[in-house]
Every structure is written in structure tokens, then in C-alpha cells.
């Protein structure tokens, strides 16, 4: 995860959201292209909303074209899209540290830590208890 070493032609970063984890690689020297889990981005994220979430760091910070390769797993499709966005933002900072201020302004560098609360013993769900009866 260092800034462009001589033997590396890509920058790698990890993005997370809830239980979704995305390993993002951006290739600055190549032309544009976006692959998620060996599928085209428009196939993996079919809705326009999810595609805009994924491309947001490029739209806000750096309009240059990059080749992006992503491995993502866990969580739902929306959480995966936000994890990819987080990973791309982190990778762009490794590419150019001047972008940190811009990306931070749009809240793309903070990991969203909210997760589902675990079920507790004696309860039906995390906090839902059985109905109490007086008699």
C-alpha cells in the first residue's frame, strides 16, 4: 500500500462498510475500465444509483481516467458499492495526497461502522423480548 513503487504499476487500498469489504486496485498509467469481481461494473452494479455511488470519488476529486479492478465480498449490494467508494477514495489519496482535503469534505474517507447488533441470549432478536403478561 505504498505510493507507486518501481515494480508496481497499481495502487491498492481496502474499503469497508458494515460487513462488506472491497479490495481496490487503480492503474494510473492505463486507459479507463472498471471491473468488479471479474465482471463489468454495469453488470455487477445494475442500477444507476449504485454506479453513481461507485464513481463518486472520481467525479468529485479527479476527472482523470483510471483502470479500476475490485474484489468485493460480504454485505449487500448497496454496502458493497459504498465499500468500493471508500476503497477508491483511499487509493486516490495514495496516488495524490492533495486530494485528501477534497475527499474528506465529501465524507468519503470515513468508514461507516454501523452494523447489525448481535442477538442476545433469552431474547428473540437483539433487543426484542417476549411479551410480558401480568397474569
Image (cartoon, rainbow, N blue to C red):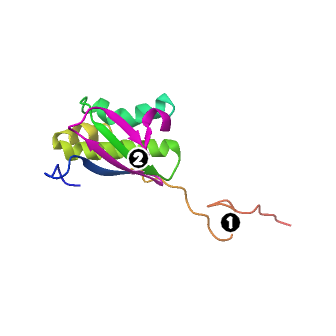
Q: Residue furthest bottom?
A: 121
Q: Position of residue 30 (x, y in %)?
A: 24, 36
Camera-side residue of 106 and 44: 44
Asked whether residue 108 is in view, the answer is: no
Q: Secondary structure at mark 1?
A: loop
Quadrant position of residue 96: top left
The residue at 82%/65% (across/down) is 134
Give the answer, above or below, for where 115 lies relative to 50.
Answer: below
Mark 1 to mark 2: distance in Å? 32 Å
Question: Which residue was labeled with disc 2?
Answer: 83
- Residue at 50% over, 53% down: 74
Mark 2, Cα crowd under 10 Å, few <14 / some 14-19 / many 20+, is many
> Pointer 1: what residue?
123
Q: Quadrant of the N terminus?
A: bottom left
**Residue drawn at the location 53% of the way across and 47% of the way down:** 76
The C terminus: image quadrant:
bottom right
Q: Which residues are magenta?
A: 16-44
Numbered label attached to residue 7: none
Q: Is residue 36 magenta?
A: yes
**In the image, 135: left or right of 15?**
right
Amino acid at each position: 500500500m505504498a505510493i507507486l513503487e518501481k515494480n508496481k504499476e497499481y495502487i491498492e487500498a481496502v474499503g469497508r462498510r458494515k460487513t462488506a469489504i472491497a479490495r481496490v486496485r487503480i492503474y494510473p498509467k492505463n486507459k479507463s475500465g472498471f471491473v468488479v469481481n471479474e465482471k463489468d461494473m454495469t453488470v455487477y452494479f445494475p442500477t444507476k444509483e449504485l454506479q453513481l455511488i461507485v464513481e463518486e470519488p472520481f467525479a468529485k476529486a479527479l476527472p482523470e481516467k483510471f483502470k479500476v479492478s475490485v474484489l468485493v465480498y460480504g454485505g449487500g449490494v448497496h454496502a458493497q458499492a459504498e465499500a468500493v467508494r471508500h476503497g477508491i477514495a483511499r487509493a486516490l489519496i495514495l496516488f495524490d495526497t492533495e486530494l485528501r482535503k477534497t475527499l474528506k469534505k465529501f465524507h468519503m474517507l470515513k468508514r461507516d461502522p454501523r452494523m447489525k447488533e448481535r442477538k442476545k441470549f433469552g431474547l428473540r432478536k437483539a433487543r426484542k423480548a417476549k411479551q410480558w403478561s401480568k397474569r
